[in-house]
Image (tube, grey):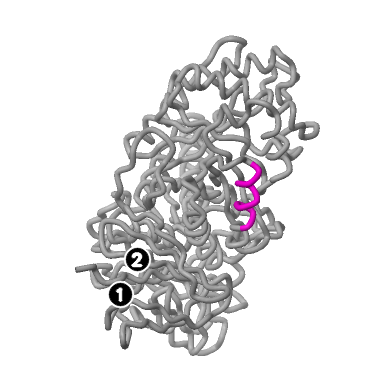
Amino acid sequence: MRVLWLVAIAAIAAALAAYLALRTAGVLGPRAAGRAERKFFVRLFYEGCRGSPLLYSDPLMRRNFFERGEVAAFEIDVSNPEDRDLKVAFFLAPADDPSRLVKVHEGVARAGSVTRFSFEVDTSQLAPALYLLVAEVEGRFSSNTEPFRSTNLESYPWLLAVLGGPARWEAPSEGLPRLVVPEGLGVNIHFVAPSPAEERDLDMIAYAGFKLVRMDLFWHLVERERGSYDLSGYRALTEALRRRGLRPLYILDYGNPHYDDGLPPRSGEGRSAFARFARKAAEEFGPYALWEIWNEPNIAAFWKPQPNVADYVELAKAAAAAVKAACPSCVVLAPATSGVDVDFISRAASLVGLLDWIDAVSVHPYRDSSPETALGDYERLRAAVRGKVVVASEWGYPTAGRYGNVVDVWRQAQHAARIYLVNLMAGLPVTIIYDWKDDGLSLEDSEHNFGLVSHHVRGPEWFLVKPAWYALYNLNKRLAGFTPAGRLELGPGVYALRLEGPGPPKIALWTEGGERGVELSVGAERVKLARLFGLEEELEAPGGVLRLRVSGSPVIVELPAQP
């Protein structure tokens, strides 16, 4: 009898564990269709792929991106607290023009209950672009309504990203990236040996056309015992990157408890030990990686107890010399300042040797203002570093939290594209977007909201791209192989970058904010225009002059081929 009881208890425990696992994975939701809540809500319960998946074979994987030709499946709950039935219709609309609504499903939300609607969308019938999914309930348009906005994942708009194949471009595997789209574009990550879910992260990084991946190469993880170095995790990451045509940008950082009490090295012994660690890493990964000396040494958060220019320069010189000794062709970046800190960098440059040892000056141009305001900062910085190459090795805008540079997800997408275009316009060969993935689900912590894709905290099967991911994917796919060929002057507040490459010239157009009318000489009666999220149009240009209104959302105009 005791054995039977134990078997029964084990079965109940297993069933409970399975139920909780399904709840965590989202297969079972916190509310099933049935009795209505006291308030009206519309909730996306499931979005994934049915039929013959082209990208990922897992039918339980929750994703909002689909290779054109896949069948996207949706399940949506509508709570109707009223005592009458309500008509419900579901629509898709291009994110570039939400007024172009196309009905994809309709039904009735029963009175006093939660009704679940299930339907599919054949993406082969859609042009590659980013689409909004919206519900109309008796004239009320809704998505993600309360009470489900307790996390950032639940606050994102419902999206259907239809992909037209990966953004492809073969980039050199050594040296400083060329000023060619997308050779110098990358993202920050926060993992080493990739898990299966993180392998998918790398897949989607490569699919979008990014070529660089920036990651801390932590001293304290590599040298756990004095004089003994374990780079196995980074070896696994490097090989995973190499398989996808991605190059690592490794940051040699931070302290090690074996030296200087774990603080930034200040003693001769600590600097020598850090230099040995740097040399060991460079011997292992060589010129395939780019190397950055520390991260944001100009702020106390990363150089405790207080920033010290002289101490940093001594460490950077020792580390850079060690990297170059192991690998003369390795590219070394420094000092990776928070902001474009011209004062810190000027003082560092005045100390003998630093600029001689590094290949480029790296900065993180974070700001509460628009990306275009960095152009003046770059000019001042170049004057201070005597023409040394400048790169932006970290920059982004969060979509929630308490930082002063918080923007909504649509403005984040605009800013991400403009960060890259501004840096191309300014001649910066490297642009690293912070961050690849939201670091958590909090709507209060800005550090949880910098990502181009959602956090996977609900399970590895959750993978939702944000509009910013699609904006950069679209930019890379359309401009791959193109290089900046000069800024056009089209009036105050208007930015126009001419790009030339393996096809007809293209012009990227946008404003710093608000709409403005522009006239652009295009030399043809009709031209093609692509919007930020993939919508394509053909526009008339009477007399060879294109007249259109542009905004903070960049567009790409394709000029006619030259005879």
The magenta stretch spans residue 522:
no
Answer with left or right where residue 343 lies relative to residue 385.
right
> x, y percentage for residue 432?
51, 47
Would you say the magenta stretch is mainly helix, strand or loop? Answer: helix
User: Does the magenta portion include 377?
Assistant: yes
Distance of label 1 from label 2 (alpha carbons): 10 Å
Task: Decide which of tag 1 and tag 2 comes sooner along the chain.
Answer: 2
Residue 506 numbered tag: 2
Q: Residue at x 57, y 73 (%)?
A: 493
Q: Position of residue 544 (x, y in %)?
A: 31, 82
Is residue 251 positioned above or below 519 on the image? Answer: above
Segment tinted magenta in the rendering: 376-384
Asked if residue 540 can be seen in this view, the reply is no
Q: Position of residue 89 (x, y in %)?
A: 40, 83
The amino acid sitting under disc 1 is Lys
Front label number (1 vs 2): 2
Residue 307 position (above or below residue 211): above
Mark 2 neighbour density, 10 Å: few (under 14) some (14–19) many (20 or more): many
In this rendering, does residue 497 appear at all?
A: yes
Residue for point 64% across, 28% down: 254
- Image quadrant assignment for residue 160: bottom left
User: Dot 1 corresponds to which residue?
Assistant: 528
Per the image, label 1 sits on a secondary structure element best described as strand
Up-down relation of residue 519 to residue 341 (above or below)? below
Give the residue at the far top of this rendering. 227
Q: Which quadrant holds the C terminus?
A: bottom left
Looking at the image, residue 451 sits to the left or right of residue 125; the answer is: right
- The percent position of residue 368, horizontal first and vertical second, equals 68, 60
